[in-house]
Image (cartoon, helix red, strand yellow):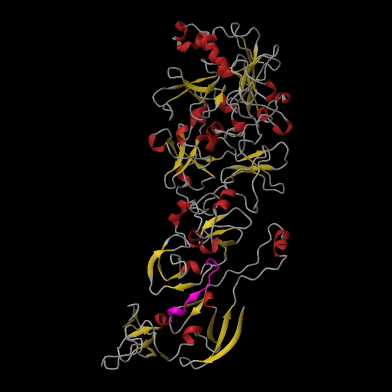
Amino acid sequence: MITAMEQLLHFTHDHMLNLVHLQPNHDNKNENSDEEEEEKEEGEEDDFVAEEKHVGQCKMCKEGIYSFHMSYYECKDCDDDYSLHKICAEMPKTLQNHPSHDPHPDHNLTLSEGFQRSDDPYFTPDSEWTCGVCNLKRKNLFNYHCSICGINMDIICATMSQQKMDHPSHPHQLQRMPKKMVSCCNACGEEHQGTFYHCTTCFCYSIHLDCALLPAKLLIQQHTDATFTHSHPLTLAYSFPRVDRAAKYYPKCRVCMKGFYIYFWLYKCDKCQYYVHINCATSKTEPFMSIFLHPGSGKIYKNFKDDDYPNLLHCPFPDESYNLLRHYFLNNKKEFITMIKEEEHGGEMLNHFSHQHPLILLDSHTQQTSLIVLHNPMKKIQVLCDGCLKPITEMPFYKCSEISSCGFVLHEWCARLPSQIQHHPGHPEHVLVLVSKNPHQLLGLFFCDICRLPGNSFAYGCIACDYYVDINCAFLPKEITHEAHPGHLLSRINASSADLSKKLCNSCECYLQDCNIAFHCPSCDFYLDTECALLFPGMMRHKFDKHPLSLRYNPVENHPGDYFCEICEDKFDPKNWFYHCSSTCAQSMHPACAPLILECEKHVYAMFKRGVFCYMNVKFEGTIEIQRLHEHRLSFLQGIQSHGLCKVCGKELQYNMIFKCLKCEYSVHVYVFNFMSWCHTPKSERRKRSGVDDVMSSITTYAV
């Protein structure tokens, strides 16, 4: 790396000085270097050495010796690292016609050390003096002295015209500016104080010395005290063109989560979609900087103690079977035990208000093992709780004792729900009462006023206000944590307030004004709506993949290419959440496309973030009959492409809830059918409970 070129005996030192040449660290790659890089096995570490920007200090000008100086003189015989800039070591003893000695450029300037004023009786060689060019106080520094004017010029100002650099970021040579200053740097866009280099051709282009000396490659953890980590070295880039940013969905800095400007420098990973500002990559991060930490960037400092929150809900849920009710049941059993006694055990009967037959509790002590069938989507076995419509994957659970007549099942916690709740955050003014079906809608359908999802499961409702929430949204916690924002508490907030109308969910980037309740980290201004916080499980299984898929919040490492959903085959933005298999298959998919619910596997609509989750609270079963609207019974189904168009509105039935006649192929949207029912109700009857009860009196509902 260092090669001896010449020798010099300098008057400031007793030993011979060797001229050493600083070779650039950017070695030329051979023609096969790109192919060799591609052939590297995954996980193999990169061989690189961070660029040494500072190799010593000049004994004459007291400034650093950097790689852009190209060469310098060094003593091989001394242990105290005696070094000189090449331009300092080769300065003449006398200068003539120097342009900075104005108005007397014809005076000779003599090279000397210290303060030169022999007529001063208090003169000492280490006295402080002022440079006549930059007006800075100097001490123990070589200078050029004019014996006629009595002016001293430090050797930095004397050699200013020779202090240049060739930087790869700019096509022209950069000249050192004569004075230290406070200015905005064209490399990072931030204000710096100190030494700048500017382009004499472009005039407006100037970069601070610290930015000019940034290493071509670095490991971010070595420069941020391991607060921010990435397994690969980052490469310095001198611009981020708009076309490149658009191709990567306008990525944000993985430290501060702010955007990039086209002309400012950045560090990027050539193997991953990892981008970071140069100041963020090289700063020594203090503990308070953890508020800028984005998920996956590195460590974070917790802002709460676990002992203060013993029953804290940690999201996302482990899998599709876990939900809020299970969490509360396991942590607050006494609050849930209202329907049966705690000492009841397997085999005992329960008469539940939601079902006409007695229910039997099935657990490990149950003798009738033939009754125990658990949900298994991989084997296309669907067992959904009739209370919350979530899968039943373990015991104990309740099952209808009339085995031959129906398959009604309930989670143990769904069977123990309290009959009413007070002071619900979305409707605190009235008590919400537990109902098995919405009494005012066909087949008990309702739209939850919290998550906005349709459902026909158990609900808590206020009949007077026509306000209904599904039983999971009825127990929203005051605080949660989420892996997307680790270590910080997220507090429940009223998202419908005017102050939050323009805030976006950090997951889906939808406006919070579209939901009633959200979760917020006040120190980071981080928001999650209830759907993103509670809807997507942390792990799920694809029916065509033997590996589980995990919920990811950032682009995956060792994934330099574009991201395509394996289900809909569309390209997607990896800044938004997605499911990914970290095993050899490396498949990715939208959360909206992840087929973990059997009844939605063939009918995916990923335009909206809900996708296959849209009807997760709906059980498609049952028939209705309204003779004045259609002569045959209508089945409640989810629309698919073969169902064609609605017979009333003429729009496609696919992806929607529909009523279909299996005899005459008559099909209609549920919302259209509800409107038709309303129109056929006399005006006098509409005034009674909005006219719904009278419509329901002419409807007969049967379970399939």
Residue 658 sits in quarter = top right
Q: Is residue 352 visible?
A: no
Q: Position of residue 694 (x, y in %)?
A: 51, 8
Q: Position of residue 345 (x, y in %)?
A: 61, 26
Q: Is residue 319 above or below residue 192?
A: above
Q: Quadrant of the C terminus?
A: top right
Q: Quadrant of the N terminus?
A: bottom right
Task: Name the one closer to the observer, 151 or 563.
Answer: 151
Q: Position of residue 415 (x, y in %)?
A: 57, 24
Task: Name the one closer to the observer, 300 or 182.
Answer: 182
Please tell me whether residue 515 belongs to the stretch shown in magenta. Answer: no
Q: Residue at x 43, y 64 (%)?
A: 204
Q: Is residue 682 visible?
A: yes
Q: Is residue 205 above or below residue 375?
A: below
Q: Is residue 589 above or below residue 336?
A: below
Residue 458 sits in quarter = top right
Q: Residue at x 44, y 9 (%)?
A: 687
Task: Name the one closer to the observer, 270 or 379.
Answer: 270
Please tell me whether residue 168 belongs to the stretch shown in magenta. Answer: yes
Q: Is residue 195 left or right of residue 83?
A: left
Q: What stretch of residues is rendered in magenta?
A: 159-170
